[in-house]
Structure formats: C-alpha cells, structure tokens
Amino acid sequence: MAPVQLNSNGNASVSSLQIENGFADSVSLLSSEKAVEELLQPSVQGMDDHLVEFSEALRTVAKALRRAAEGKAAAQAEAAEWKRKYELELARNKWLHKELSPVERNYDSQNGNTAEVVNQLEVSDQRNEQTPKCCGQNGICTHEVLRDGEADCDSEMAKDRMMKKASFKLSWNCNGKSCNQYKHDIVSFARGNITAAERSSKQISLKWESDPRTVFVLTKPNSTSVRILCSQMIRWLREQKKLDIFVEPRVRSELLTESSYFDFVQTWKDDAEVLLLHTKVDLVVTLGGDGTVLWAASLFKGPVPPVVPFSLGSLGFMTPFYSEHYQESLDSILRGPISITLRHRLQCHVIREAKKNELETEEPILVLNEVTLDRGISSFLTNLECYCDNSFVTSVQGDGLIISTTSGSTAYSLAAGGSMVHPQVPGFLFTPICPHSLSFRPLILPEYVTLRVQIPYSSRSPAWASFDGKGRKKLEPGDALLCSMAPWPVPTACQVDSTNDFLRSIHEGLHWNLRKTQSFDGPRDP
C-alpha cells in the first residue's frame, strides 16, 4: 500500500501514486460529502439560535410594553395628584386674598352667581374678624389652610355645605411647653375634612371652632346588645345634644321597627349619596370592634370625619372607648379639645394585562389595615415579583405577601411574623406569608414610596388579592398591583393619647410580654 502522509492539520494526504490508480476520485467525493455536512450543520444550529433569540426578543418586547403601561398608569396617578395639589393651592390663594380674578367675575356674572360669591366672601370676612387670634403659633385654623379643590361654579351648594359642616382646628399637643411647629405639617380643610400634607408622629389635638351638628352612627350587625345601645345613644344625642343623626339604611329600618319615634333619623338612598357623606357628617361614632372601624373607613372614599370608636368587639386595637360610659365620652368629645390618631390608608390600583384601553382601568381601593396577596385554592407556590419605586425588591415564593399599614401591624401582619408598629409611624409593612426561604425577613418601608407587585408570566397559577379581608380579586400572570399611601387618613379619637391607647391595647388585647416577675431572694452579684 502506498504510504499516507499526515499534514500539519493532522489530515491524511494521498500520494501521487494513489491519484494515478483512481483512488483520488473516491477520496474527493468523500471530502465533498463531509464539506456539505459541515456547511449544513452550522446553518441548522444557526436557525435554532435565531428562533431562540427571536422568542427572547418577543418576551422582552412584551415586558417592555407591560412596563410602559404601568408607567403610564403611574404617570396618570401622579398627574392627578399634582392637579389636585394645584387646585388646592389655587383655592387657598382665593381664600387668603378674598378676591376673584376678572375672568372669574365675568364667568360668575354670566351664570348669575356674582352676588352669591360676594356674600360668601363677606361671611368669611366676618368670621375671620370675629376670631383674629384663634390660631397663634401652635395651631392651624380652618380659614388659613387649604380648602378642597371643588369648583366654585356652584357657590350656593358650597355655601350650604359650609353652614352644615362644623369647623375645627388641629394643633400639636405640647403639654404646655413650647414646640417648634411648622404651619402646614397638618392640613385642616375649612369644612371639617382632613388631609395630610406632611405626616408626623407628634400627638395631634383637635379643637372644634363651631359646634358639631350631624353625627353618623355605625353599628355591628346581628348583635342585640349593640342594637339596644344604638337606640339609647341616638335618643340621648337627639334629646340632650340636639344633633342630627345619620345611620345606615339597615339600622334605620331596625329603629323604625322598634318605634316610630326614630323617624327623624336620616340615611341615604343610593351609592351616589354615600360619596357625599363627608360633606354632611361632622362626627362618626362606631359601635363594634375593629371591623366596624374598617367598614366606616371604607364608606369614605376621600376625606374622613373624626371617628369615635366604642369597643363592643373582641380585641379592639382601634376602639379605646368603653360603651358603658358613652355619655361622658361623647360629652367630652363634643366639647373638645380631643387627641386624635391619624391612621394612614393605602391606595391600591389593579392593573390588568388584558385590558384593551384606559376605560377598563379599575377604580382605586382604599385600605386601612392591609392588602393580602395569596395563592387561594391553588396548591402551587405563589410567585410574586416586587418592586419599590421601580427598584427590584425580591421575588416572593411562598403562601403570599402582606402589605400593611402601621395601623394594621397588629392584625394579619402580626400573625405572619411582622412587627408591631405605633399607628402614627408613617410607613409600609412588607411581610411574607410562609416564605420558602430561611432568610426572608419582614421589612418596613417609608411612606413616600410606591410598591408594585407583579404576577410573572412564568407563574404556575394566578394570585388572589384581598383588601381589608374583603373584595377578593384574581390576578392573572401579567397583572400587577400598585400600592401607595393615600392622602386621606382616618382620624380616630383617643381616650388618653395615641401612645397610651396603643400600649394599652397590646397589653390588654395580646397580653404583650406578660411574665411572672423574678423573685428577689435569689443569688445576687457580689
């Protein structure tokens, strides 16, 4: 056989003798087949690589579109908030300068409202002249601060509301000592509505500037003792205090069934009237437990009047007043001043991946305790991607997640291992539910951030969101939940002050740190 020589690449080279015998043709044919295979194999592999890259590109585009939709929703919410602030500042300037621009004068004169606006301003001038020193350095008067941003085109309705609503002043409770208070830390509206511009953990005091006229009484259902106390309280408020009474339609029916005497009690007929409750009610009284306070807060989609919660429930972290002494308590509160706790609420938006246009965007939901995301009836782990102001926080893999206010820190969040937090500490509690991780600890985040919880496309099952234990919503892969701090807190009256009521509630309700005292007759340090 002819010798075969190896070239530098390690391939066999055929000698001239083999070429002459015709063996070169078969060798060249074999080499051609190998070359074709070498050409085809990279093309197939390249095609697979291109398909993978194309699918990844489509996935990236889908994520980008989803983020754009969420960013648009967040931008719209921010624009609405800035618009509200602008309208509030505009109304404040009108209130302080007590004059209308020429354009507004022409507009009002065309609608026949000039005289009414002038009369309204004259009434405000007289009120301000009567109380020139009502504020001082440690108080915020209702005529000095922001008013809500309602239009002035219907001045007769605005005038009627101002006459019905009781005005009041909020101030820091300094216990007789000098305190460095900034004027607009707390904002009190002229018609008795409260909003918070900059929140603080200082103790806040409420002082009535005009007597309250209307009380809204809310009761726990299906309780005979609560029903009896409700009728007694309403009779006392009407006969002794000469107040107008608002109740739910269910309660009014029960009262009229008991006696026709309660025909003076007012209620609402449809949901549209519920939205205007804060314009008619000066004070809210709840008879029940914490659940009744949550229900009262859910009825007010905007500003909330001061709430006086009476304890007729189980634990009562938010109900410091005892029903046995309701006359003394209400008499003191109606006389004033009283200490209040501003309980902040969450504002939640559900963003659907499948929505076709902006008209399908769901209404925001206000939450006083917490919003919970769980796996529902599914046996799979919940998979949640969490962001804080567009910064990635973590992926939750477990039974779910609790986003709680500090008022809700003694509720579901506490049972899931979260910390108890003073209700006037502004912030979010970020508490996982049974996470499948040894290092997942709860977080407390500042109140100015926006949290976004998203169901990833790779999730094996949907998630379920519940708001203060009600209104469960199904979140499919691609859906998201946005949570931010609402501008309308729930002001609850304190029996003593905010800190005393909070500590007493965890001592009496949870027996916090209850332990026998160590005996004194043991060994001692030398």
Image (tube, rainbow, N blue to C red):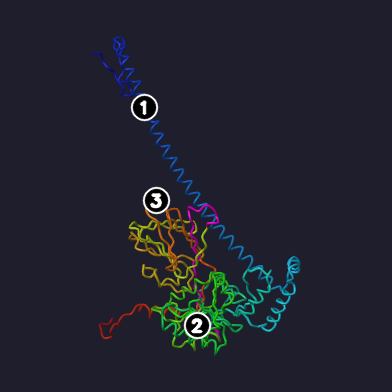
According to the picture, the residue beneath numbered tag 3 turns out to be 458
According to the picture, the residue beneath numbered tag 2 turns out to be 256
Q: Which comes before the other along the chain, label 3 or label 2?
A: 2
Label 3: which secondary element? loop
The residues colored magenta run 336-360
The picture places residue 191, in percent across and down from the top left corner, at: 61, 76
Query: Crowding near pointer 2: few (<14 within 10 Å), some, many (20+)?
Result: some
Q: Which comes before the other along the chain, label 3 or label 1?
A: 1
- At x 51% / y 72%, what residue is drawn? 299
Residue 359 sits inside the magenta stretch? yes
Q: Is residue 96 visible?
A: yes
Which quarter of the rendering shows the C terminus? bottom left
Disc 3 marks a residue whose amino acid type is Ser
| Marks 3 and 2 close (CB-CB < 8 Å) | no
Q: Which comes before the other along the chain, label 2 or label 1?
A: 1
Label 2: which secondary element? helix
Disc 1 marks a residue whose amino acid type is Glu
Query: Crowding near pointer 3: few (<14 within 10 Å), some, many (20+)?
Result: few
The picture places residue 8, in percent across and down from the top left corner, at: 33, 23
The picture places residue 468, in percent across and down from the top left corner, at: 44, 68
Furthest residue toward top: 20
Label 1: which secondary element? helix
According to the picture, the residue beneath numbered tag 1 turns out to be 38
- At x 49% / y 51%, what residue is drawn? 66
| Marks 3 and 1 close (CB-CB < 8 Å) | no
Judge whether 303 appears above or below 262 on screen: above
Disc 2 marks a residue whose amino acid type is Leu
C-alpha separation, residue under disc 3 versus residue under disc 2:
57 Å
Residue 106 sits inside the magenta stretch? no
